[in-house]
Amino acid sequence: MKEQLEQLKAQALKKIEESKDLNALNDVRVSILGKKGELTNILKSMKDVAKEDRPKVGAMVNDVREAIEEKLRIRKEAFEAAVLEVKMASEAIDVTLPAKKQAEGHNHPNTVALNELKRIFIGLGYEVVDGPEIEYDYYNFEALNIPANHPAKDEQDTFYITDNILLRTQTSSVQARIMEKGKPPIRVVSPGRVFRADEVDATHSPSFHQVEGLVIDKNITFSDLKGTLAQFARDLFGEDTKVKFRPHHFPFTEPSAEMDVTCFKCHGKGCRFCKNEGWIEILGCGMVHPNVLRMSGIDPEEYTGFAFGVGLERIALLKYEIDDMRLLYENDARFLKQF
Amino acid sequence: MNTPLSWIKAYVPELDCSVKEYCDAMTLSGTKVESAALLDKNLSKIVVGKVLSIEKHPNADKLVVTKVQIDKEGNAIQIVTGAPNIKVGDLVPTVLDGGRVAGFHAAGEGAAPAEGFEIKAGELRGVPSYGMMCSIEELGSSRDVYPDAPADGVYIFSDNPSYEGIQPGDDAIEILGLRDALVEYEITSNRVDCYGVIGIAREAAATFKKPFNPPVIPKTGTNEDVNDYVAVDVKADDLCTRYIARVVKNIKIGPSPLWMQHCLQAEGIRPINNIVDITNYVMEEYGQPMHAYDLDMVEGDDTHAHKIVVRRADKGEKFTTLDGKEYELDDRALMICDGKKSIGLAGIMGGQNSMITDNVKTMLFEAATFDGTNIRLTERRIGIHTDASGKFNKGLCPDTALEAMNRACALVEELGAGEVVGGLVDSYKNPWKEKHLKWSYERTNKVLGTNISKEDMISYFKNEGLSYDEATGEVIVPTFRQDLNEQCDLDEEVARFFGYANIPTTLPSGASMSGGQPFKMRIEDLCREVARSYGYYEAQTYSFESNKVFDKLLLKEDDPRRNAIQIRNPLGPEFAAMRTLPVNGILASLSTNFNRKNKNVKLFEIANIYLAKALPLTELPDERKQLTFAFYGENEKNQGFYEMKGVVEEVLETCGLIGKNVGKVGGDAYVEGLNQNVGELAASAKGELSYDANSGITFLHPYRQANIVYDGQVIGYIGQVHPLVEKNYGIGESTYIAVLDLKDVVARASLDVKYTPIVNLPLVNRDISLVVKENVTHAQIESIIRAAGGEHLENVELFDIYVGEKIQKGYKSMAYSISFRGKEKTLTEDEITGAMNNVIEALAKNDIVLRTE
């Protein structure tokens, strides 16, 4: 019996080894382990074995079965792997073919720049507000300490609709509206379109965007203005950005200043980008003029404040190194997709 | 304002800093330097040479060989030159071996290299040459500035008597006034005093804390009294604060001295003759324009031989200015007249009838102060602008007029240009007084955030010509500082001279505030996100456009959108109308892209339209933000409309109008402006979206357009652009556009999303194929199915439309997948069949039958 089993095992393993494919392997399996298979037949003859020998023989049969099944499994896995390999090989691709992308859209560079500014100022506790683009002369000029016939009105080359309604020339027009509505403390930024009668060229557009900032509270100082805008410049242009404040004149702030930042290309050494100055002018700012506070019903003895105005296009042009402002309004897809 | 640094140094003699240090410090104290050009930047080793001999060149007809003395000792060098204008004995600027010149030989040879040219000894046609004689262009200047320079050839000192006394070997650069820097300033409109050299010099003195030495003006004039010559009657003293007249007789016209010419040359003013040069010099120095009349042309009246009357022009008065142009005036213009006629357009230009000529014998000098606004309005109205009006329109200080007049007369005497008649005619009815300003130094420190001592502050004031009254605690401001009127102005003076850079850097104290943006801006940001995710690029276009746009868009004659708000002073007709609909800008941008052969371009814009409540405008219009999508180039034929619908519905879904379970409309807070909570517009409006093809939009394809209707209100429109409009914009592909009124969207939007429980019971699908008449819409079928489907119906999905030979003409086949789901238990087959039977029955009632083949 034992010999018979050993012989069967040897033959079976050999057949398994020699089978050429899955079908052949299956035939081998059926011929040995099937209902009429050789090993099954041996099992059937167990009844002829002496009772006391049966456990021993049974164990032997199991050993043989396990050996055969193990061999079958290994052989089957090998065949399956080979089949899979052939299938996958037939699926080989050219990994250098062009990528398939989701046709993602893009924000306008002005929006990208505005989002940066909003992020920074919202983080500093500013509320974003807006105001009308077609505005009363009062809010655009008079409430900003620019009375009738003031030369600054000429300088700004205003588009007029009627004698007292115009296209706002500056987002500062929102200042008085905010101060009339709300009580200090006030901490707002107001982005939006403004208009000036400038012919279109590489650095001018009759329509552009500004972001106005206004802070009114007790004990607001010029040093607060400096600190806030220095922080803004570092957030926008990088930690190593330095700022420089130069005295300037705006009718609605006193003292007034213009702020330069170190050129972000040469970091202040001087290059073609900053015309060898090392500095780039970024914004105008100052302490809110007491006349402006008074006109909006805020007592300048109790409250002080600062205001600043940033040209959004200026930031976008500088930050993205765009050399012609007209590109911003042509809306050429090849331009827009870069942002 | 361009001024040579030497002129500033003349009044601040102790100023000893480099040009760069000067410019940086002035900018930081508030007198912004725009540029500084070193006039001798590329000039070196250039001396006065004396031509000793001129010989023919052996090998060249157009060249000569010269000997030129280059020092006082008599040393000479040989120079080969082609200059046609030299003769023996001439003194010429001569650059020596190894020296440098700034430009080409003559004008019109293009821009010279930035670093100039080096001149080296060499041979010209076989003859050695050890230097070069220079033209004015080679010296970096031009005949505009040095009118005595010849048109062709080298500059010759000895042809101009002003250079008398110069010697060979002298520094030619210095003699030409080129050892200097030309500094250009940006003067802010409040600093009228700094439109003159004196004002800038005063700032320089205060900035560098050096003494300020303005010109000392001696008493001038003969023993005669000018009042015997001329009388002045200012009738319009509201427009003429001050009028000063003096008379100069026995005038000797001649060239002005070199130092004066150099100052004017550096300012870009051509020297003409002594009298003209003096008025120009004083105008630059004090910022006060003056005018000179030929007194013999100034007529008098019954009591005076010569008389000046300052009055408003007559309506329709015609006047010829000294440049020969005639202007028609009205009674807003201010005129200078004599006893009989007008002789000058006040503050702008004198008249042809009284201008001085080379034959002038006696002259009337005018220094006056006119109302700046009136000058500005007049020059704008009649379209004339002069150097003088550019100064007057700033609004000058009347006290400067007197200084300028006396300075001019002193220069007349100094230059020997004539005899100044004694005395002054001065009409100054309301003299300006110095201002006494209340000032608290504590307040200055409080506003600046500094801790500057009172003494330091007072010293800043004194350095710039202000004074402090210890007794009253007031700061006394002289009349020329019109810009200083209250405490805050003095705060700035302290800040300027303390140095903005020295002020500390802090952040605002006080309670921290929570920043954020209003709900409508959040909605706008979400719209951008959706647009981006659908592949749209954000465009920005102008708010104003041509009135022709309405024709381009085929708007009907009576379309209210033709009533656009008009700009009174537009840049041109193409920028005249404030847009009343947002489609033109984006179509024009698509057109640009199409012309540039960009494929499949998808653009969106968020911007206002402006709707007048009434025209002409008496109150502000309704500004309505519009979200506009547009594209050309379809991925799938005839699917453009539905692609557009896709992005529109995505926007509405994102904003909570459809497809989501939302709570309050308006989300957390709908903020129009600061602290103004408009609040919830409706409790929880979950509205119905529909499309109304009966939209009648002229610029859209009549059979491919619809209004976007939400809860019965039109909130936008969508469609293919009308083929004629596509043609008008030159877009050669099918173009689609959709517009959503964001004001309407925001009013219905909600970001207050509420969770709907997920049911895990199985979903059962039943597909049906229907035959319907061509004009029946999907929306009609869907609503019938939904109405009849019962409470377990979950979804109705159209998955096929077929029109063709298998279907009767005039009909189409539409296939739907209808799905059901039980709410608490799995649906039985009977329940589903029952629901489907109801659906089929309802459809049949509407002549919609199941497709049989």
Image (cartoon, coloured by chain):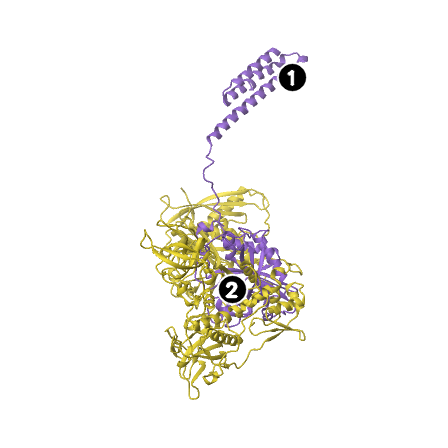
Colour given to chain A in the rendered image: purple
Q: Residue furthest left?
A: B61
**Secondary structure category for the residue under label 2:** helix
Q: Which mark is residue B198?
A: none
Q: Which mark is residue A59?
A: 1
Q: Residue furthest front?
A: B73
- B806, above or below A24, in the image: below
Which residue is at the front of the view, B517 or A32? B517
> Is residue A330 visible in the rendered structure shown here?
no
Q: Quadrant of residue A118?
A: bottom right
Percent position (x, y) of residue B425? 49, 82
Q: Chain of mark 2?
A: B
Q: Quadrant of residue B50?
A: bottom left
Chain in yellow, by letter, is: B
Which residue is at the front of the view, A112 or A154? A154
Same-subunit check for callouts 2 and 1:
no
Q: Residue at left 63%, top 14%? A: A47
Q: Which residue is mark 2?
A: B6
Name which residue type carries label 1. Answer: Ala
**Secondary structure category for the residue under label 1:** helix
Percent position (x, y) of residue A69? 58, 21
> Is residue B810 visible in the rendered structure shown here?
yes
Percent position (x, y) of residue B682? 57, 60
